[in-house]
């Protein structure tokens, strides 16, 4: 989580300086991403949207590979099959259909695979999301749908997007679902493990709605102060999952200032590599 935060902060600076073209921040969603990624382990094939940087780092994708797409250097900076992590998708919800198709295809090849797909609350309103949920249910696809609901689809709040929880919609397709607070990675890990057990036992999809808090704008080209109430931004930053989890582990005696210092040094070294690579 600390590595993802450091990468995110440095990428935002590099974008502001003109060294990369665009950067969608994952700040506020680190617990949701690391909790799900650690629970899945390396064998689940992941179809991300475009801000799953913490998931990518958990899959051991190098930071320079992760950044290459956003610098316009390549379509995908890493080897998708090697990391079981497919390229970022900017067309909202299209990756949901890709994930379901991949799962069904692997089954037809007699190589069944569990697949996870990440999408946001805004993407859940796209037709492709509904099509993917319906197809997954009808075909009993082994897909874990992970909706990171950060409360905002660019400038549109969730309250203006829908009348029900995203998880509630899953029942209409015949899919089991759950809602989890995305502030604590341990809670997210537990909910993800439950979802994966259901998929394995029933050969059926599952939808997990992870409630998160967006700390920055939708992307580096978005000024959230233009539409988002200051109190809402303040409340979100007060529930910063990185800071909250550090405080929790420190209070429990699990981590020390010395350990945190070592982690800070490691993150600083990664940030230095980012500067060397993308300021050239």
Image (cartoon, helix red, strand yellow):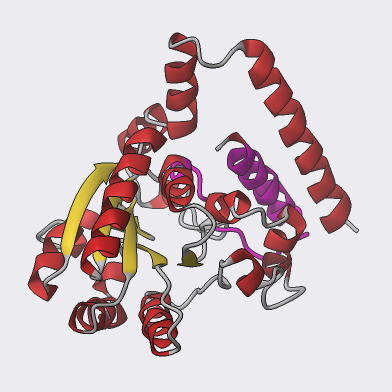
Viewer can see residue 184: no
Quadrant assignment for the N terminus = top right
Q: Is residue 60 left or right of residue 159?
A: right
Name the residue located 12 percent from the left edge and 60 percent from the top edge: 168
Name the residue located 45 percent from the left edge and 26 percent from the top edge: 245
Does the magenta portion include 272?
no
**Residue 84: x %, y % from top left:** 57, 67
Magenta segment, which residues? Answer: 3-30
**Residue 256: x %, y % from top left:** 60, 12
**Residue 272: x %, y % from top left:** 83, 41
Name the residue located 76 percent from the left edge and 42 percent from the top edge: 271
Q: Is residue 105 above or below residue 4?
A: below
Q: Is residue 19 left or right of residue 69?
A: right
Q: Is residue 248 left or right of residue 210?
A: right
Viewer can see residue 41: yes
- Seen from the viewer's position, the closer of residues 104 and 128 is 104
Q: Residue furthest right?
A: 280
Q: Is residue 70 above or below residue 223?
A: below
- Seen from the viewer's position, the closer of residues 105 and 9 is 105
The picture quadrant where one finds residue 264 is: top right
Name the residue located 82 percent from the left edge and 57 percent from the top edge: 278
Does the magenta portion include 15?
yes
Q: Residue furthest front?
A: 110
């Amino acid at each position: 989580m600390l590595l993802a935060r450091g990468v995110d902060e440095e990428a935002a600076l590099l974008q502001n300086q003109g060294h990369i073209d665009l950067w969608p921040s994952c700040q506020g969603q680190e617990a949701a991403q690391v909790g799900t990624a650690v629970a899945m382990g390396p064998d689940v094939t992941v179809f991300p949207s475009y801000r799953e940087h913490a998931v990518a780092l958990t899959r051991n994708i190098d930071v320079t590979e992760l950044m290459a797409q956003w610098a316009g250097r390549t379509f995908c900076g890493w080897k998708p099959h090697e990391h079981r992590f497919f390229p970022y998708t900017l067309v909202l919800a299209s990756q949901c259909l890709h994930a379901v198709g991949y799962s069904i295809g692997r089954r037809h090849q007699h190589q069944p695979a569990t697949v996870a797909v990440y999408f946001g609350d805004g993407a859940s309103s796209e037709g492709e999301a509904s099509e993917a949920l319906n197809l997954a249910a009808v075909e009993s696809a082994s897909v874990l749908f992970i909706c990171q609901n950060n409360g905002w689809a660019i400038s549109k709040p969730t309250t203006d997007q829908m009348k029900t929880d995203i998880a509630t919609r899953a029942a209409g397709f015949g899919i089991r679902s759950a809602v989890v607070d995305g502030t604590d990675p341990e809670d997210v890990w537990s909910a993800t493990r439950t979802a994966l057990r259901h998929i394995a036992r029933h050969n059926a999809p599952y939808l997990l709605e992870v409630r998160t808090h967006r700390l920055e704008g939708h992307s580096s080209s978005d000024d959230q102060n233009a539409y988002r109430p200051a109190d809402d931004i303040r409340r979100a930053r007060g529930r910063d999952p990185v800071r909250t989890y550090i405080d929790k582990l420190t209070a429990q005696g699990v981590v020390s200032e010395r350990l945190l210092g070592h982690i800070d040094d490691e993150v600083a070294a990664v940030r230095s590599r980012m500067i060397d690579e993308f300021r050239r």
